[in-house]
Each structure stands twice: as C-alpha cells, then as structure tokens.
Image (cartoon, helix red, strand yellow):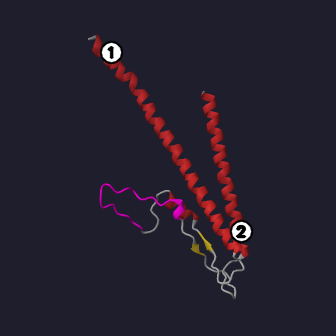
Amino acid sequence: MRRALVSIWHVSCSYPFERIRFGERQVINGINNGFKFMEDALNLRAYRQQVLASNIANADTPNYKARDIDFSKELQRAQGVQVGNLNLSATSSGHMQASAGTMNAQALYRAAVQPSIDGNTVDMDVERAQFADNAIHYQFTVEYLRDSFRKMQSAIAANA
C-alpha cells in the first residue's frame, strides 16, 4: 500500500516539471525563430544595399538596367512561406522540405521612370531615396537585435 502511494506522489510531483521543460523548449524555439527572422532580414537588407549601390555606381553606364529586390516577397521566401504559385512536390519520404534562403534572392529589373537616350534606366533620385530607406531599416534591425540581446542578458543576470 505504501509503495502505491509513493508512485502516485511521484507521478503527480513530476508532472508540473515536465510541463515546465516543454514550456522552456517552446520559449527557446520562439527565440530561435525570432532571431532567424532578424538574420534573414539583415541578410536581405545587406544584399539589397549592394544591388542599390551597384545601380548608383552604374548611373553613367550605357544600357545599364536598374535592379532591385522585392524585400517582403524575398523575406517570406527566406522564412519558408509559399510565394506565388510555386509548389514543390516530395515524391519520396526521404525528400526534405524546400526552403529558399536569402542567398536565392532575385534582383529584378526595375521599370524605368524616365529612361535616358543611352538606354540606362537608373534614376539617381529614386536610387538615393531607396538606398537611404534601406540603410535606415537595416540600422533599425541592428538596434532592435542589440536591444533584444541586452534584455536577454539582463534577464539571465537577474536570475543567476
């Protein structure tokens, strides 16, 4: 009789701890997903900055076509969200889920606002504005990450 009582006590005693461990995993997974999102956003912002800088550098190059990326579409693609009508099928149980990363971002040609006689489609006003906007968003993301790390360090130090 005493043995049965001990096993019941043990089950009821350990149950809340199992729930806490499961909850901790959910928190850690949430943190990892948040940082993955920010990593993808920073990588895309850096890539877009390179594309815009290339446009500015080639402003006087004959027949150069200005390029840009669709940031929100590429960020969704990097996060594994289906974009457009692209469906990948797995024909075997061994196939892995496809996930297009930020390195596969497509730089598309931008429609010319006022093309020049030499065929160049770079509009310096548009490029400068897009370059500044992208730089501000990049800096905001860096500051947000820095603040998140500080808060996590503070929480860890308070619980240590």
As drawn, is 3 to the left or to the right of 150? left
* Left or right of residue 38, residue 5 in this image: left
Tell me how far mark 2 sits from mark 1, CA to CA: 71 Å
Task: Specify whether residue 126 is in view.
Answer: no
Q: Position of residue 78 (x, y in %)?
A: 51, 59
Instruction: Say few, some or many: other residues with alpha carbon within 10 Å of mark 1 (under 14 / 14 to 19 / 20 or more).
Output: few
Query: Is 153 left or right of 4, judged from the image as shown?
Result: right
Q: Position of residue 14 (x, y in %)?
A: 39, 24
- Give, as a single range, the part of the protein colored magenta: 86-104
Q: Is residue 5 magenta?
A: no
Name, please, the residue furthest toward the bottom.
117
> At label 2, which amino acid type do we have?
Ala
Kindly state the secondary structure of the residue where label 1 is placed. Answer: helix
Quadrant of residue 69 within the rendered picture: bottom right
Residue bearing mark 1:
6
State which tag comes first along the sequence, 2 or 1: 1
Tell me residue 47's x, y (percent): 61, 63
Q: Is residue 53 visible?
A: yes
Q: Name which quarter of the figure residue 152 lies in.
A: top right
Q: Main secondary structure of the magenta part?
A: loop
* Residue at left offset 73%, top offset 75%: 124
